[in-house]
C-alpha cells in the first residue's frame, strides 16, 4: 500500500473529501478533532453580567462586569466602590480563592453570582501598602543611618541624592520592560551607566502605591498641573516628602515615597520656590522601582536623640540586604 503525504494544513479538507472511505472508528476520531479545532477558531464572546460582593462588614455591593474581566479588575472595582485596597482583598467563590490573573469565566462565574471578600492577614507595614508579590527583597536597602558626606552619586548623568533616613524596598521590575539598561549596573558605584535613567521621587498617599506599581503612573489621574501637564517627581526626597501623606499602621505613623527612574529624553526640569520638579509628559516616562518608607519620630524621641542621626525605622519583618544593591 503506497503512502500518501498530506500537508497538515490540508488535513481536515482531506478527511472531509474521503469521509466515506474512513472506518467508523476513524470517523469518531475525526469528528472530535474537527469540533475541537472549530472551538479554537471561535472564541467565546464576552458577556455583560451583574455580580454581587459581600464585603468584610457584610455590605452587599453590586458590580457590572464582563465575563472576561480578571479577578484583579473586579478587585479594582471593589476598591473604587468601597475603598478596600486591592492587595487587602481575598475574593472567594464556593469557598475557592480566586487568583488575580484568572478571568471570571474561568471559574464559571455567571450572572447574579455572589462573591465573598476576606481580609488578608497583614503582618508588616510593607504588606499593608503593597502586594508582597510585587517586591524584590534581594534589592532592599536600609538607608536609615547611611551618610554620604563627601560622596557624589550619578545616575543617568544627573546627580542621585540617595534616600538617606529611609528604608527602600525594591519593586520587581527586572525583565518587565524591553531591557534593563534604564536601571544601570547592579553594583555599588558613583558613576552613571550608558542608557541609564536618572532617579527621582514621588510623594503620595499609601493607598496609591499598589496601583502605581501595577498600572504605572496614569496622567489621567492628575489634577493640578501648576507648571505644565505631566507626571511630577523630584530629584530631592525632602521635596517629595512634602507631598507624602501620613498613614497609621499598628499605632505607628509612617510616610511613603516612590523611588523612580525618569526617561531623560523627555524630562523637563522646573525650579520652584519649593524645590526642583521634574515633569514627565507621559506616564510611561516614569518607572517606579522602589518604595521608601519612614516611621515618624515621636516628640520625646526627638528630645532625647543626640547628634544628627536620622529617625529610626520600624520594619524588622523584612530582612534588608546590605549587598551591592544601593542604587
Image (tube, grey):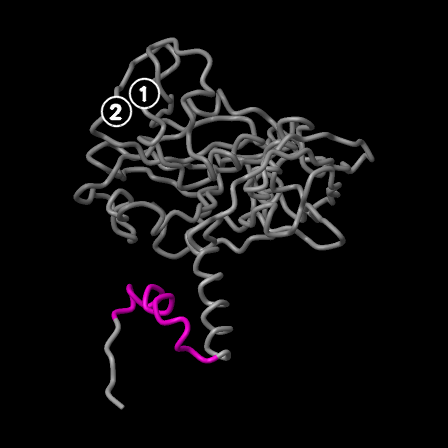
Left/right of residue 59 with respect to residue 243 in the rendered view: right
Element type where label 1 sits in the image? strand
Q: Which quadrant, please, contains the C terminus?
A: top left
Residue 21 against residue 80 in the figure, above or below: below
Image location (x, y in percent) of residue 286: 34, 31
Majority secondary structure in the magenta region: helix
In the image, is residue 202 part of the stretch drawn in magenta?
no
Earlier along the polypeptide chain: callout 1 or callout 2?
2
In the image, is residue 9 part of the stretch drawn in magenta?
yes
Kindly identify the residue that appears in the image at 58 percent across and 34 percent down. Answer: 305
Quadrant in the rendering for residue 260: top left
Residue 262 against residue 67 in the figure, above or below: above
Pick the front one: 40 or 236 = 40
Image location (x, y in percent) of residue 308: 47, 33
Quadrant in the rendering for residue 68: top right
Q: Is residue 19 shown to the viewer in this render?
A: yes
Pick the front one: 132 or 307 = 132
Disc 1 to disc 2: CB gap under 8 Å: yes
Residue that protrudes farthest toward the bottom in the picture: 1
Query: Can you identify the residue that label 2 sits on?
Result: 267
Element type where label 2 sits in the image? loop
Residue 279's disc is: 1
Residue that protrudes farthest toward the left in the picture: 194
Image location (x, y in percent) of residue 38: 45, 56
What are the residue bounds of the magenta stretch? Answer: 7-23
Image location (x, y in percent) of residue 32: 50, 67
Q: Which quadrant, please, contains the N terminus?
A: bottom left
Amino acid at each position: 500500500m503506497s503512502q500518501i503525504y498530506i500537508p497538515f494544513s490540508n488535513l481536515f479538507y482531506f478527511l472531509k473529501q474521503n469521509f466515506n472511505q474512513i472506518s467508523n472508528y476513524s470517523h469518531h476520531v475525526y469528528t472530535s478533532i474537527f469540533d475541537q479545532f472549530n472551538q479554537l477558531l471561535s472564541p467565546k464572546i464576552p458577556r455583560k453580567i451583574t455580580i454581587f460582593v459581600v464585603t468584610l462588614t457584610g455590605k452587599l455591593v453590586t458590580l457590572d462586569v464582563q465575563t472576561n474581566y480578571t479577578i484583579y479588575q473586579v478587585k479594582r472595582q471593589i476598591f473604587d466602590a468601597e475603598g478596600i485596597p486591592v492587595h487587602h482583598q481575598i475574593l472567594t467563590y464556593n469557598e475557592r480563592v480566586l487568583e488575580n490573573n484568572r478571568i471570571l469565566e474561568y471559574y464559571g462565574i455567571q450572572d447574579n453570582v455572589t462573591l465573598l471578600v476576606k481580609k488578608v492577614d497583614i503582618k508588616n507595614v510593607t504588606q499593608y501598602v503593597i502586594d508582597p508579590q510585587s517586591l524584590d527583597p534581594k534589592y532592599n536597602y536600609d538607608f536609615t543611618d547611611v551618610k554620604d558626606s563627601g560622596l557624589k552619586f550619578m545616575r543617568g548623568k544627573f546627580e542621585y541624592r540617595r534616600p538617606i533616613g529611609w528604608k527602600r524596598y525594591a519593586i520587581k521590575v527586572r525583565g518587565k520592560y524591553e531591557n534593563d539598561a534604564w536601571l544601570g549596573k547592579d553594583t555599588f558605584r558613583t558613576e552613571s551607566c550608558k542608557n541609564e535613567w536618572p532617579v527621582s521621587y514621588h510623594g503620595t498617599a499609601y493607598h496609591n502605591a499598589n496601583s502605581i506599581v501595577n498600572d504605572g503612573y496614569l496622567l489621567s489621574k492628575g489634577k493640578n498641573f501648576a507648571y505644565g501637564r505631566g507626571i511630577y517627581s523630584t530629584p530631592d526626597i525632602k521635596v517629595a516628602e512634602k507631598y507624602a501623606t501620613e498613614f497609621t499602621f499598628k499605632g505607628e505613623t509612617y510616610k511613603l515615597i516612590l523611588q523612580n527612574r525618569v526617561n531623560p529624553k523627555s524630562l523637563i526640569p522646573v525650579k520652584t520656590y519649593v524645590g526642583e520638579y521634574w515633569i514627565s509628559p507621559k506616564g510611561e516616562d516614569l518607572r517606579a522601582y522602589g518604595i521608601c518608607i519612614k516611621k515618624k519620630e515621636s516628640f520625646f524621641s526627638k528630645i532625647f536623640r543626640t547628634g544628627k542621626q536620622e529617625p529610626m525605622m520600624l520594619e524588622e519583618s523584612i530582612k534588608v540586604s546590605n549587598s551591592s544593591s544601593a542604587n
